[in-house]
Amino acid sequence: MEIGDWKSMSGMAGTYRKARELGLETNLAELETFGFTVIPPEKTGVPRDFTRRLLDRVLEIAEDEDALAVDLNKHSDTKPADDRQFFHLLRRDPLFIEAMMNPVSRTMGAYMMGQSYLLSGLVAFLKPGPARATPMHTDSIGVPTPLPFYSAVCNISWVLTDYTVEDGTFGMVPGSHRWCRHPVLTEQPGFVGGMLEVGMLVPVCAEPGSLVVFTGNTWHCTYPKATEAVRSHVVVAYCRNFVFPAESYDDLPDEVIAEYGPEFARLIGRQAWQGYHFEGPKLERIQAVRPAYQSHHG
Ligand SMILES: O=C(O)CCC(=O)C(=O)O
Ligand SMILES: [Fe+2]
């Protein structure tokens, strides 16, 4: 059917039309129904070598950066997996800006987080060899149960290497995004020592260049990684306008912001209504998030 600029949709009609134009309607249906979807490389519109370049950059960062520069890497016995994580990628290479500004990742972000969505973080996961499993969790850090049926954060992951069960891919619990709660301690798969019913967990297999997309309510873990092969993905995490983003972009040079334009500036919080001092909030910034009162698409 034809989709007009329907006011009650608070901007979602435009996002939907864009999704249709990009061939993403099936992915939206899968996301709604199962809480996750895999977008194949041919739909992302990036040059063929984009993923390879992203991976090379992650590997270079891994070589340059002291593992102990990242706090989470210091806790080897409590850490969920023998991996390394790299944060604040926006400052490290324009390639990562391309990854977040990609029309497909943005359309999925706007679909899940509403028009007033923000960038919460850009983080790379790297497992250079065998690794323990990451336990079942949601990405809704700090959000109390019951989780809102619309999630507050989402995960759009650029898969940079082959994601198979042996390579420690994601495991998801289909439909868990509608349960609106975090898993409890016993709801872990057997390979993490828990009692999750067999058959509840499904692997998400994806080739390099795919986007694995899931809501902040979706229960996920990763399988133990048995192979020596490098395994990596880059998470583009978006959040709703009222969420305090995980990363701060106040150190991004003005030239970079000017180069990528007003929507980029908005996404990294330069128009956020929060963060004022004595002068109080700017009225136009508060008005900009008003459509979110009308629907969770705003
Ligand atoms: O790769 C991992 O071990 C964990 C990944 C994950 O939980 C995520 O990307 O949200
Ligand atoms: Fe996660």
Image (tube, rainbow, N blue to C red):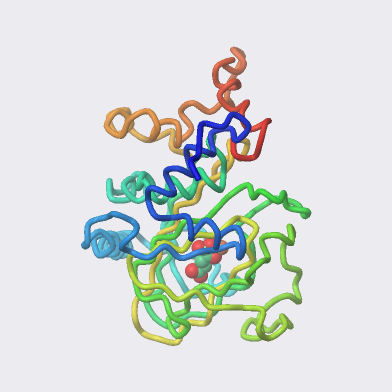
Question: Does residue 104 appear in the picture of this structure?
Answer: yes
Question: Does residue 69 appear in the picture of this structure?
Answer: no
What residue is rendered at 34% in x and 44% in y? 91
- In screen coordinates, is 12 left or right of 144? left
Q: Position of residue 250 (x, y in %)?
A: 44, 33
What residue is rendered at 58% in x and 32% in y? 10
Q: Nearest the camera: 205 or 191?
A: 205
Give above or below for 184 relative to 180. below
- Splitting the image into four quadrants, where does ligand 2 fall? bottom right
Outermost residue on the front side: it is: 1
What residue is rendered at 38% in x and 66% in y? 159
- In screen coordinates, is 49 left or right of 145? left
Give above or below for 69 relative to 196. above
Count of numbered badges drawn on the protein: 0
Which quadrant of the figure has residue 230? bottom left
- In screen coordinates, is 290 left or right of 122? right
Q: Position of residue 127 (x, y in %)?
A: 41, 73
- In screen coordinates, is 147 left or right of 260? right
Q: Position of residue 238 (x, y in %)?
A: 51, 46
Q: Nearest the camera: 38 or 137?
A: 38
Outermost residue on the top side: it is: 279
Q: Position of residue 189 (x, y in %)?
A: 66, 81
Give above or below for 58 relative to 192. above
Give above or below for 152 relative to 31. above
What residue is rendered at 45% in x and 52% in y? 236
